[in-house]
Image (tube, helix red, strand yellow):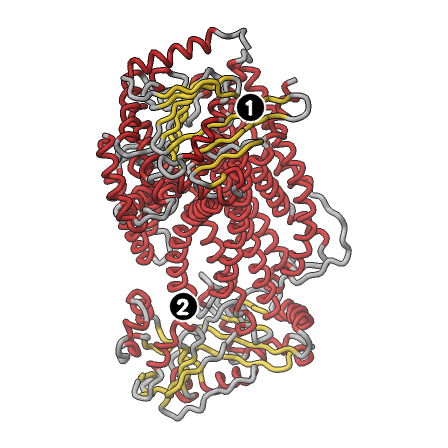
């Protein structure tokens, strides 16, 4: 009997529940699909160690963020349910009036929640399983592997996790509803108007002041954020966050009052058509729901920022990868990277006279078949700091901030010889430099230092190294000097060979050395061949076995000849792995937050329309035609949806421009294209909810007003 | 009927503003047919204050709804100011209500989100009047009808009587041809009732408004210049006040009502 009642209730409330139901289904589907990624990967063909590592990282991050996602969806479910139940107060009041015990009413409610919850879980999981099949193809593509043997896979782990999370969410929501119904007095349940619906506008002067204060607070928040620069979580960051949250809440509390105040004094604008009615409708809604609008705004801000920063990071890590991995492999040898190295490396150095190629090729038979060309660059400490150069530049403060300049000034200059530099350039087909005996040149690939580099390269800039006075080359070089994930050549000084010879009279060992290799065959073959060579040339100590298949675990790291190895292929794989991680996370979190907030707004708007039906009928009686009424409805829907979006967008623009200035622009990354795409997608999804809500509201109002008289 | 002939004869001078001609309204379909109005014919002249009285279920509200185009008659014609409103198309109805009619309902029907001022102004903004003009008209009218002090308040903050007077102001502010009132004193206490009725009376005598008021209260009807009695969807009596003082008029109305009420079996 109870179940029958519950079933009919849910069927009847079809339209109200539709948007809520669909959104929950989407949420469940996404939750399952992303958590099932790990199990999908068993289908992939051979994956490299790097890719496997990236995948593990992704799975871990998804697990962590699933908690956030579950909370967001939980908030949606609990809020939407509470909202819908509150609108059915009268119905529940009637049950109680007819003599149904509170316990039975609770059970009907519980039954309804279980029915809806079960339905959405089942449909959501079905959708999620379908989605995850598609997602595995996408994952494979992003990681650059293939999936030749496709099998339909379902992940019991992910199902279990999804079911667990959502059962908890629905239980909490049912509990909240039951408590509400039990707590309410019968008279409240039966009364026509919501007890706390603020229809009129109170405290107008207070709100006007509040609005101005809110704008000021938000301005302060933006200012604090620009000081902080989003580099670390210092006091400015927390100040900015707290101010932003307070400012947003205050903004929504006061904006309606402010607008009313402004408009009622602009009679020329206000007293036209049914503008008064439209404005008052919006104002009363914003006032009543200012808390949830603020929360929606903050969540939208997180969604937008996650997406934007994610896109930026994507560009940053993976956008440049072709430019930075032009050498097939780079070996780095550096004593500085060791804490207390065993000095035996110095004997090896002397034995081969510091020539890494000689060392490695003597220990491996197939050196020439693997390595087509190679070039070594030694970096020698010059005994002078960058401050020498900085002092000669006018207006250095305009090119870089004080902190960076200070730390740069204290850094010792390391120089490389002209011939080694030119040999390195030749490997990748770039032009080197032709230095006169008293010139120095600068190579720089970090876009943020370009201005400084150009200024330092001027002919009148002088630098004394090893007793020799050198002058600027005139132009700035831009050639990468090794294979890395990101551009890392920062104002590298190149000097004539004689200067280096002079320096070597006082210093036996270079600060560090790069050894760049170009393969004979393709990169994959070359990598595995190099791996074997290194395993033979610098074998692991004490007969240890390699930890993984990765090249960096095949040999014993020493200050010389080989400390680290970076191969172009591995870097590219890492980059695409990172791309995958970032894209998925941004999608996961951003999309779920977006959908949840849009659903909350849609539900609120629909309910409010249903509550206002009487007002629309009165307007019609007074002689307002349907076109005007629907026009008012349209404006109300648009403003209600756009208000939190606009404010969230404003916050996001501030945050993203700060990150852009401090991080992206520095490294010459311009993610605005990708950010534009994600912003457009977000707005598009939002617009879909807006349009659907408006269409539903329109049909509710139409059918009610055309029905006939209210008498 | 003789009234109809009288109308055509006096077409020029005291023009017939509203004319109902054999109006009928039937609800329902197969099996269950309810006749709300049965061959009603009525003429209202400009400047009249007509009260329509009858017991509950007599069809008086239906009559008002048909005149106000909120509902539509199933037979007969209704002419207002020369226009046959039963022939008006959907799209024209809203404009017609906006331009020609004013309403006062039992529960005032004020929009609860607007202040008193805005509620009255709404009748003018819908017509597209100049904002400056609107402000003047509303303030002026509020002063005359005595609702100045509630102009900035919301309906919830007003008393029942104040709400009805604001509704009355809204009804007349646009100078409509006809004001329709449906049980305006229904929810008011006796003092507020009296105040509202005096307002309606002054709207009729001093501002020349033509008012059609539905009521079941003889006291309210006594403020009118003419009372029409309805029972079971038919008009069956028509009382003109003439120059008689209100108390006497009230007595006559009570007599008819007694006759109406006691005559349960006589059909």
Q: Is residue B48 above or below residue A238?
A: above
| Tag 2 and tag 1, C-beta contact below 8 Å | no
Residue A64 is at least partly visible in this image: no
Q: For label 1, count other residues whose C-alpha is less than 10 Å away and answer few (under 14), some (14-19) or many (20+).
A: some
Same chain? Circles 2 and 1: no
In the drawing, what numbered circle is on residue B38?
Answer: 1
Foreground residue among A48 and A20 = A20
Chain under numbered label 2: A
**What is the secondary structure assignment of the residue under circle 1?**
strand
Q: Residue at x 43, y 49 (%)?
A: A642
Label 2 neighbourhood size at 10 Å, few (<14), some (14-19), many (20+)?
Answer: some
Query: Can you identify the residue that label 2 sits on?
Result: A666
Image location (x, y in percent) of residue A595? 53, 46
Q: Quadrant of residue B122?
A: top left
- Separation of marks 2 and 1 at Cα, in angstroms: 87 Å
Residue at x 44% of width, y 48% of height: A635
* Disc on res. A700: none
């Amino acid at each position: 009997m109870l179940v029958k009642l519950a079933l009919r209730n849910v069927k009847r409330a079809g339209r109200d529940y539709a948007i809520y139901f669909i959104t929950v289904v989407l949420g469940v589907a996404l939750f399952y699909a992303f958590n099932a990624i790990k199990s999908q990967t068993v289908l992939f063909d051979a994956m490299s160690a790097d890719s496997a590592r990236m995948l593990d990282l992704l799975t871990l991050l998804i697990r962590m963020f699933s908690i956030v996602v579950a909370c967001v969806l939980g908030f949606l479910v609990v809020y939407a349910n509470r909202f819908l139940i509150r609108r059915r107060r009268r119905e529940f009041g009637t049950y109680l009036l007819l003599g149904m015990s509170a316990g039975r009413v609770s059970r009907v409610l519980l039954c309804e929640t279980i029915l809806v919850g079960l339905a959405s879980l089942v449909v959501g999981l079905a959708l999620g399983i379908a989605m995850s099949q598609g997602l595995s193809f996408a994952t494979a593509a992003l990681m650059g592997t293939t999936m030749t043997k496709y099998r339909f896979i379902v992940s019991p782990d992910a199902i279990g996790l999804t079911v667990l999370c959502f059962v908890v969410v629905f239980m909490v929501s049912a509990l909240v509803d039951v408590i509400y119904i039990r707590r309410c007095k019968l008279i409240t349940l039966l009364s026509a108007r919501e007890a706390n619906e603020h229809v009129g506008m109170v405290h107008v002067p207070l709100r006007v002041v509040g609005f101005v204060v809110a704008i000021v607070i938000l301005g302060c928040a933006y200012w604090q954020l620009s000081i902080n620069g989003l580099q670390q979580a210092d006091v400015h960051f927390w100040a900015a966050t707290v101010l932003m949250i307070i400012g947003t809440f205050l903004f929504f509390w006061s904006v309606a009052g402010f607008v009313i105040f402004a408009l009622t004094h602009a009679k020329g604008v206000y007293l036209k058509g049914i503008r008064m009615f439209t404005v008052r409708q919006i104002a009363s809604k914003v006032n009543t729901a200012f808390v949830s609008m603020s929360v929606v705004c903050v969540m939208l801000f997180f969604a937008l920022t996650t997406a934007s920063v994610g896109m930026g990071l994507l560009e940053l890590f993976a956008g440049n990868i072709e430019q930075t991995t032009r050498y097939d492999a780079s070996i780095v040898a550096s004593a500085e990277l060791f804490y207390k190295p065993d000095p035996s490396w110095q004997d090896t150095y002397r034995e081969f006279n510091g020539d890494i190629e000689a060392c490695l090729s003597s220990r491996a038979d197939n050196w020439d078949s693997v390595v087509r060309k190679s070039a070594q660059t030694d970096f020698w400490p010059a005994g002078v700091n960058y401050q020498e150069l900085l002092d000669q530049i006018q207006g250095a403060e305009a090119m870089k901030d004080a902190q960076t300049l200070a730390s740069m000034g204290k850094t010792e200059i390391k120089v490389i010889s002209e011939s080694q530099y030119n040999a390195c350039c030749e490997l990748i087909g770039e032009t080197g430099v032709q230095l006169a005996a008293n010139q120095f040149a600068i190579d720089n690939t970090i876009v943020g230092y370009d201005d400084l580099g150009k200024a330092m390269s001027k002919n009148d800039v002088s630098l004394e190294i090893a007793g020799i006075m050198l002058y600027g080359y005139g132009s700035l070089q831009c050639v990468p000097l090794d294979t890395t994930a990101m551009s890392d050549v920062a104002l590298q000084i190149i000097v004539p060979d004689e200067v280096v010879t002079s320096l070597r009279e006082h210093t036996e060992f270079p600060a560090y050395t790069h050894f760049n290799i170009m393969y004979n065959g393709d990169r994959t073959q070359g990598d595995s061949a190099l791996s074997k060579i290194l395993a033979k040339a610098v074998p692991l100590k004490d007969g240890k076995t390699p930890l993984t298949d990765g090249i960096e675990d095949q040999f014993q790291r020493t200050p010389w000849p080989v400390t680290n190895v970076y191969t172009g292929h591995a870097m590219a794989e890492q980059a695409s792995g990172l791309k995958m991680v970032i894209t998925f996370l941004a999608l996961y979190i951003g999309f779920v937050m977006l959908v949840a907030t849009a659903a909350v707004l849609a539900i609120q708007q629909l309910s409010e329309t249903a509550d206002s039906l009487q007002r629309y009928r009165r307007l019609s009686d007074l002689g307002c035609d349907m076109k005007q009424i629907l026009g008012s409805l349209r404006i109300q829907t648009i403003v209600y949806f756009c208000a939190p979006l606009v404010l969230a967008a404003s916050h996001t623009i501030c945050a993203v421009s700060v990150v852009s200035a401090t991080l992206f622009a520095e490294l010459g990354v311009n993610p605005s294209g990708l950010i534009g795409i994600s912003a457009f997608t977000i707005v598009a999804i939002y617009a879909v909810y807006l349009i659907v809500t408006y269409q539903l509201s329109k049909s509710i109002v139409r059918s009610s007003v055309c029905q006939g008289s209210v008498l | 009927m003789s009234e109809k002939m009288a109308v055509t004869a006096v077409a020029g001078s005291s023009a017939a503003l509203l004319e109902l001609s054999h109006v009928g309204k039937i609800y329902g379909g197969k099996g269950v047919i309810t006749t709300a109005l049965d061959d009603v014919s009525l003429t209202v002249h400009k400047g009249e204050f007509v009260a329509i009285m009858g017991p509950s279920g007599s069809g008086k509200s239906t009559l008002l709804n048909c005149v106000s185009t909120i509902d539509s008659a199933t037979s007969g014609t209704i002419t207002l100011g020369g226009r046959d409103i039963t022939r008006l198309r959907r799209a024209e109805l809203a404009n017609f209500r906006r331009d020609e009619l004013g309403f006062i309902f039992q529960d005032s029907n004020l929009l609860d989100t607007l202040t008193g001022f805005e509620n009255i102004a709404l009748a003018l903004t819908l017509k597209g009047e100049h904002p400056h003009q609107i402000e003047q008209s509303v303030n002026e009218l509020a002063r005359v009808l005595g609702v100045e002090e509630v102009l900035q308040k919301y309906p919830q903050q007003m008393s029942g009587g104040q709400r009805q007077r604001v509704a009355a102001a809204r009804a007349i502010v646009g100078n409509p041809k006809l004001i329709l009132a449906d049980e305006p004193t229904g929810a008011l206490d006796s003092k507020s009732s009296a105040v509202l009725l005096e307002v309606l009376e002054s709207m009729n005598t001093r501002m020349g408004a033509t008012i059609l008021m539905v009521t079941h209260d003889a006291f309210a009807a006594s403020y009118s210049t003419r009372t029409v009695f309805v029972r079971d969807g038919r008009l069956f009596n028509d009382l003109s006040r003439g120059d008689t003082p209100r108390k006497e008029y009230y007595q006559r109305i009570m007599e008819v009502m007694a006759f109406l009420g006691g005559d349960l079996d006589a059909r």
